[in-house]
Image (cartoon, rainbow, N blue to C red):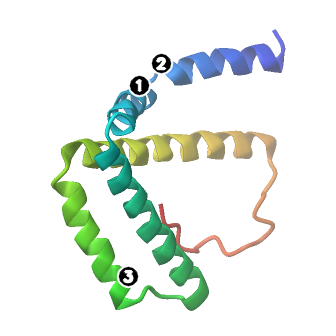
Amino acid sequence: MNIYDRTKEFAEELKACDEVVTLQKLSQSIKDSEEYKKLLSDFRKIQVKAYSQQVQDGKISEEVMEKFKSMGSVISANPPVNEYIQAEQKFSVLWQNILKILNDAIGIDFSFGEDKNRVNVK
């Protein structure tokens, strides 16, 4: 069996794992609602703005933090969106762990010495 066949097997296993099944199911509920899509889009815009400020200025402005907190309350009040974001975060952890295993297996440090303690914003 070659690496491509094994990758296809892995893809099938990944597709069937709880994190992916849940994310796909919840993703459909977002796609089916214009309101939920807009909420998620607005949340993403605030996330990107916060991340950009963090990278550029080393901190996030109070204005953006307030918007982020406010949006968090709105998200919490909308269970389908909240559940989707939580499922997305669980999948992200799974995916990062998979990538770490693969990177460790090939023995290449793709950061090339970059700061390992930098802040990751999801």
Instruction: Give coordinates of residue 15: x percent, y percent.
Output: 52, 22
Determine the residue positioned at 77% across, 13% down: 5
The local crowd at label 2, few if under 14, some if 14 to 19, many if 20 or more residues have their Cα within 10 Å, is few
Q: Secondary structure at mark 1?
A: helix
Quarter of the image containing the N terminus?
A: top right
Which label is found at residue 21? Answer: 1
Spatial distance from mark 3 to mark 2, Cα to Cα? 38 Å
Label 1 packing within 10 angstroms: few (<14), some (14-19), many (20+) = some
Left or right: 23, with 1 as reference point = left
- Residue drawn at (60%, 39%) of the image: 98
Tag 2 secondary structure: helix
Secondary structure of the residue carrying tag 3 is helix
Comes first in the chain, label 1 or label 3:
1
Residue at image position (46%, 66%) is 45
Q: Are marks 3 and 2 in contact (CB under 8 Å)?
A: no
| Closest to the observer, 45 or 92 | 45
Residue 33 location (% of width, % of height) = 31, 39
Q: Amino acid at mark 2?
A: Ala
- Residue 64 image point, x, y percent: 37, 82
Question: Are circles 1 and 3 on residues that touch, CB within 8 Å?
Answer: no
Q: Earlier in the sequence, mark 3 or mark 2?
A: 2
Q: Is residue 96 left or right of residue 21?
A: right
Q: Nearer the viewer, mark 3 or mark 2?
A: 3
**Which residue appears farthest toward the top when viewing the image?**
1
**Which residue type does callout 1 highlight?**
Val
Q: Amino acid at mark 3?
A: Val
Marks 1 and 3, how far apart in space? 33 Å
Label pair 1/2, CB-CB below 8 angstroms: yes
- Residue with the mark numbered 3: 64
